[in-house]
Amino acid sequence: MPIEHADKWADFGLGGMVIAALFGFIWFLVREHRAERREWLDAFKIQSQQMIDVARESNDVTRALTSAVERQASRRRADDR
């Protein structure tokens, strides 16, 4: 962490302190951004799993309807003969 070494930057005067403060600020922003990205990734994983579950459920319903239509069509063909 750059803040721990602020006293070394103080040897360069006000400019050194400003640079140390900027390093500290950038370090803080990077740390916060990493935490936010972790939250985004977790939320994306949850949303993706929910979408997969819905797609599976929809596929199951479509398969059930397709088989019901096929059974009904085969019965009609058998009755027409």
Image (cartoon, rainbow, N blue to C red):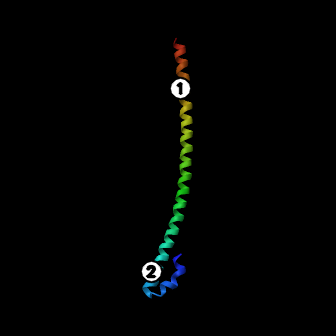
In the drawing, what numbered circle is on residue 69?
1
**Which residue is pictured at 55% across the width and 18% down the height?**
75
* Residue 14 in the image: above or below residue 63: below
Precedes in sequence: disc 1 or disc 2: 2
Front residue of 8/45: it is 8
Front residue of 72/42: it is 42
Residue at disc 1, secondary structure: helix
**Residue linked to disc 2:** 19
In the drawing, what numbered circle is on residue 26?
none
Residue 26: x %, y % from top left: 47, 73
Residue 72: x %, y % from top left: 55, 22
Residue 3: x %, y % from top left: 53, 79
For badge 2, the amino acid type reads Ile
Furthest toward the top, the residue is: 81
What crowding class fits label 1: few (fewer than 14 Cα within 10 Å), some (14-19), or many (20 or more)? few
Report which quarter residue 60 is drawn in. top right
From mark 1 to mark 2, how far is it between C-alphas? 73 Å
* Residue 76 in the image: above or below residue 20: above
For badge 1, the amino acid type reads Val
Residue at disc 2, secondary structure: helix
Residue 71: x %, y % from top left: 56, 23
**Which residue is pictured at 53% across the width and 18% down the height?**
76
